[in-house]
Image: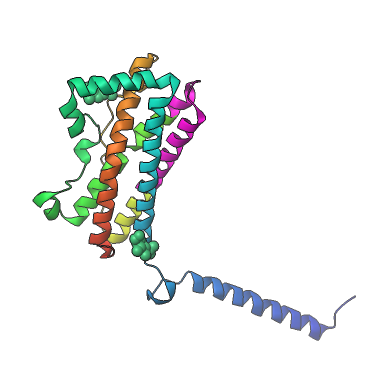
Amino acid sequence: MELPLSQRHFWTLLLLVVSNLLLWEKAAAILPCLTKEGGCMDPLVETFNNTINRAVTIRSLAEQMDEEFFRNDGSSIYFRNFLSKMIREDYRSFRARTHCHSSITNPPDWGTEHTNIATEKYLKMLINFVGAWDAPLYNLVVELSAMDDVPETILSKAKEIEENNRELLDDLRWILTKAYPTEKTQENFPSWQHLPYIKSSLRNYKFWAIFNLSSCLCEDIYFTIFHLKALRCRITRENC
Ligand SMILES: *[C@@H]1O[C@H](CO)[C@@H](O)[C@H](O)[C@H]1NC(C)=O
Ligand SMILES: *[C@@H]1O[C@H](CO)[C@@H](O)[C@H](O)[C@H]1NC(C)=O
């Protein structure tokens, strides 16, 4: 049945109006926030909060994963041996974390050096500190996936840590471009010299590299959370 012309007109017009309304609503939703009242949030603060939540997630996963390595039948003997060896022979370096590949990129965390560092430089140092974990975590996941006696609970934590670290890094890059739009990014991630160890077919070497990584990560993530909070305060002036 054909509609009379006038009625067809009416429906077309109505459709046009409705679709325009929908479009308008969508545009309104993505308009930038002009005010914080009425639940409008500052995307920088929101992204900083996101990064902190991610880092807290990594901290909890890394601690659980480390514990599981100490408990798991396949790895516990290695982990116990390395820990006692380290406490015996290399305790100072262990505490100072000088053996951690990331330690050279860790921004200063106290004293005048910490206070005087320019915010932009500080943010870039943190990007390198977090980025230092990109390749090692990737390789950790690859190697754990290839071993047939690694329990799913450990593997899934390693994967989740790697993913969160990658997203955290991307969020920091975004923050840098928003806070310093004209700045060129110069990333310089320290290389991880123990890659051949984690790839070794000798379990002792493999677990040695994994042990070092796991204990360094558990320490580093505390610094990451500290620096993220310090930078959120400096850049957004929120939650100081
Ligand atoms: C960010 O986190 C702080 C502290 O947890 C909270 O007080 C604030 O409301 C959060 N802001 C946004 C925009 O998420
Ligand atoms: C593990 O860390 C110790 C320092 O405590 C270092 O001497 C050793 O070379 C590291 N080994 C691997 C495989 O990462």
Give the residue drawn at x 35%, y 15%: 204
Residue 168, magenta (yes or no): yes
Q: Nearer the viewer, residue 205 or 129?
A: 205
**Range covered by the magenta-colored residues:** 142-169
Is 113 left or right of 61, judged from the image as shown?
Answer: left
The spot of residue 202 in percent (x, y) is 37, 13
Give the dominant element type of the magenta stretch: helix, strand or loop: helix
The spot of residue 11 in percent (x, y) is 75, 80
Residue 36 location, quadrant = bottom left
Task: Note whether 183 is above or below 104 in the view shown.
Answer: below
Residue 74 location, quadrant = top left
Would residue 106 be seen by someone viewing this image from the given angle?
yes
Q: Nearer the viewer, residue 8 or 234?
A: 234
Task: Note whether 14 is above or below 32 in the view shown.
Answer: below
Q: Nearer the viewer, residue 70 or 149?
A: 70
Is 144 left or right of 102, judged from the image as shown?
Answer: right
Give the residue drawn at x 48%, y 35%: 156
Would residue 43 be seen by someone viewing this image from the given angle?
no
Residue 187 location, quadrant = top left
Quadrant where the C terminus lies? bottom left
The spot of residue 212 in percent (x, y) is 29, 27
Is 70 left or right of 239, judged from the image as shown?
Answer: right
Is 229 left or right of 5, judged from the image as shown?
Answer: left
Ligand 1 picture quarter: bottom left
Give the residue drawn at x 85%, y 79%: 3
Residue 226, magenta (yes or no): no
